[in-house]
Image (cartoon, rainbow, N blue to C red):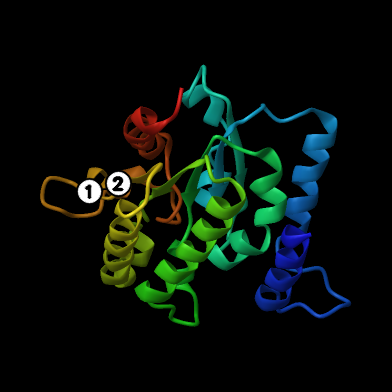
Amino acid sequence: MKQFLSLLLLLALCSGADAQTAPAFWSDIVAFKKQDSAGPAPARPILFVGSSSFTRWTDLQQYFPGYPVLNRGFGGSTLKDVIRYSYDVVLPYRPKQVLVYCGENDLASADSISAEEVTLRFRTLFGIIRTNLPDAHIAFVSIKPSPSRASIQPKVRAANAAIRKFLKRHRRTAFIDIYDAMLDANGNMRASLYVADRLHMTPEGYAIWQRIIGPHLLK
């Protein structure tokens, strides 16, 4: 009952849609539910959830063979969206580990969200997961240095630092830092790691993520 009431509250707080309109990303959630109906998800998976950097990692299993990975990223999402749908795309799977990549879209939004607000949103999501899945390991993949979003990099670095500090205070957590590894020797963004939009990654970018994320995955 507590989970049900909490879900109603989150929907009321987070959704800006009226009663006649499906909330943003609902079609993605329906697609996930259809996938689950067609074939069961791995038991106690390692769940990847967040925005398009995960959504576009369509061959995730090939990067992490032998691990029960499950990708529930939905492109364009913010942390508010992941909070809204946490009872659909996180909790039902009872994952042993949750990896979150989200917050970049929040910082780049027209509303000019601050690093402090992104940190607060992540802490809210963390609280939902930890309350309902107390044994789950929770990891945050740092927000990446996207060339198309060069102007928000001070906020990106501030949000990464604040979330790292927050996670250090909690057990069964990890801050997975991919930021510096995606810069060149002079600290500049590497355009070769991104496709033409200078936002989404090439296989070379994902290979860097594989190398850094892999050691953090639970056996």
Tell me which residue sits at (80%, 28%) in the image. Answer: 39
Residue annotated with mark 2: 177
Residue annotated with mark 1: 180
Tell me which residue sits at (49%, 68%) in the image. Answer: 121
Question: Mark 1, residues whose alpha carbon is within 10 Å: few (<14), some, or many (≥20)?
Answer: some
Question: Mark 2, residues whose alpha carbon is within 10 Å: few (<14), some, or many (≥20)?
Answer: some
CA distance separating discs 2 and 1: 7 Å
**Mark in front: 2 vs 1:** 2
Residue 11's place in the image compared with 202, above or below, is below
Q: Are marks 2 and 1 in contact (CB under 8 Å)?
A: yes
Say whether residue 51 is visible.
no
Q: Nearer the viewer, residue 121 or 48?
A: 121
Say whether residue 216 is visible.
yes
Tell me which residue sits at (37%, 37%) in the image. Answer: 209
Q: Amino acid at mark 2?
A: Asp
Q: Nearer the viewer, residue 64 or 125?
A: 125
User: Horizontally, is 84 left or right of 56 in the view?
Assistant: right
Q: Nearer the viewer, residue 100 or 111?
A: 100
User: Horizontally, is 30 left or right of 86 in the view?
Assistant: right
| Residue at the outermost left position | 186
Residue 118, located in which quarter of the rendered image?
A: bottom left
Q: Amino acid at mark 1?
A: Asp
Q: Position of residue 194 (x, y in %)?
A: 39, 47
Q: Position of residue 24 (x, y in %)?
A: 71, 67
Residue 47's place in the image compared with 102, above or below, is above
Q: Position of residue 113 (x, y in %)?
A: 44, 78
Q: Secondary structure at mark 2?
A: loop
Tell me which residue sits at (30%, 56%) in the image. Answer: 164
| Residue at the outermost right position | 20
Q: Which mark is residue 6?
A: none
User: Horizontally, is 166 left or right of 56 in the view?
Assistant: left
| Residue at the outermost top position | 66
